[in-house]
């Protein structure tokens, strides 16, 4: 869970991430007395937990690298919805206190089975929340699947003098009814 504090103009004053664990039975039921199927649900596949973009040679640094995760997101929604994205930090953090701007990373939500997308711009990741996709839905019983495509292309200036190794950043995805 992420708690965000805003000022009167809507600017972010601070964020705090708190990890919670919840356990829910696979099928909620009250004996058929009330409809307990949620109007809005989403599921990220386990493959989305860690997306590794690897730069292995000079060609990768010159042209960038990409990664597509098929069926990364599944959504059930009784209404149209949006998917939004932001970064928890302004930089990738690496070994030896090295940093790379998060703006080298972009992401695009691509339609999969059952998905009806109105718009899905390629979005450059930043700490500011941005629209990733605007989608149509009117039946919560229909599962809509989406693929995530990441691309990273740093400039020579952004990587000059960096230590080799792993760099990481946390990305936050929001699903909002429209």
Image (cartoon, helix red, strand yellow):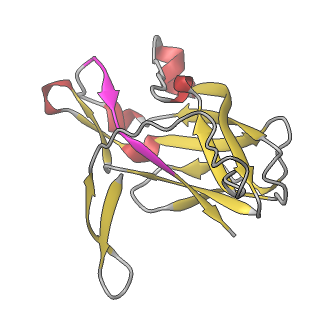
Q: Image point 65% across, 27% down: which residue?
A: 68
Q: Is residue 41 left or right of residue 156?
A: right
Q: Please count the marks in the image.
A: 0
Which residue extends farthest top? Answer: 56
Q: Position of residue 112 (x, y in %)?
A: 80, 36
Q: Is residue 103 left or right of residue 5?
A: right
Q: Image point 59% across, 42% down: which residue?
A: 107
Q: Image point 63% across, 37% down: which residue?
A: 27
Q: Image point 66% across, 53% down: which residue?
A: 36
Q: Position of residue 98 (x, y in %)?
A: 20, 32
Q: Does the magenta portion include 17?
A: no
Q: Position of residue 110 (x, y in %)?
A: 74, 40
Which residue extends farthest bottom? Answer: 8
In magenta, the rendered stretch is 164-173
Quadrant in which the C terminus is drawn = bottom right
Q: Nearer the viewer, residue 48 or 19?
A: 19
Q: Position of residue 137 (x, y in %)?
A: 82, 57
Q: Does the magenta portion include 166?
A: yes
């Amino acid at each position: 869970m992420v708690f965000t504090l805003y000022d009167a103009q809507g600017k972010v004053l601070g964020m705090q991430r708190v990890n919670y664990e919840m356990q829910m039975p696979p099928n909620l039921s009250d004996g058929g007395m009330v409809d307990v199927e949620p109007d809005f649900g989403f599921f990220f596949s386990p493959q989305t937990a860690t997306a590794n973009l690897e730069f292995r040679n000079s060609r990768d640094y010159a042209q960038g690298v990409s990664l597509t995760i098929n069926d990364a997101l599944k959504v059930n929604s009784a209404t149209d919805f949006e998917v939004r994205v932001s970064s928890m930090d302004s930089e990738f953090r690496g070994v030896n206190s090295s940093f790379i701007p998060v703006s080298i990373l972009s992401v695009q939500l691509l339609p999969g089975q059952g998905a009806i997308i109105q718009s899905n711009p390629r979005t450059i990741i930043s700490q500011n929340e941005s629209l990733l996709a605007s989608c149509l839905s009117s039946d919560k019983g229909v599962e809509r699947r989406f693929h995530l495509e990441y691309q990273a292309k740093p400039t020579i200036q952004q990587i000059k003098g960096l230590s080799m190794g792993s760099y990481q950043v946390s990305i936050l995805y929001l699903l909002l009814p429209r």
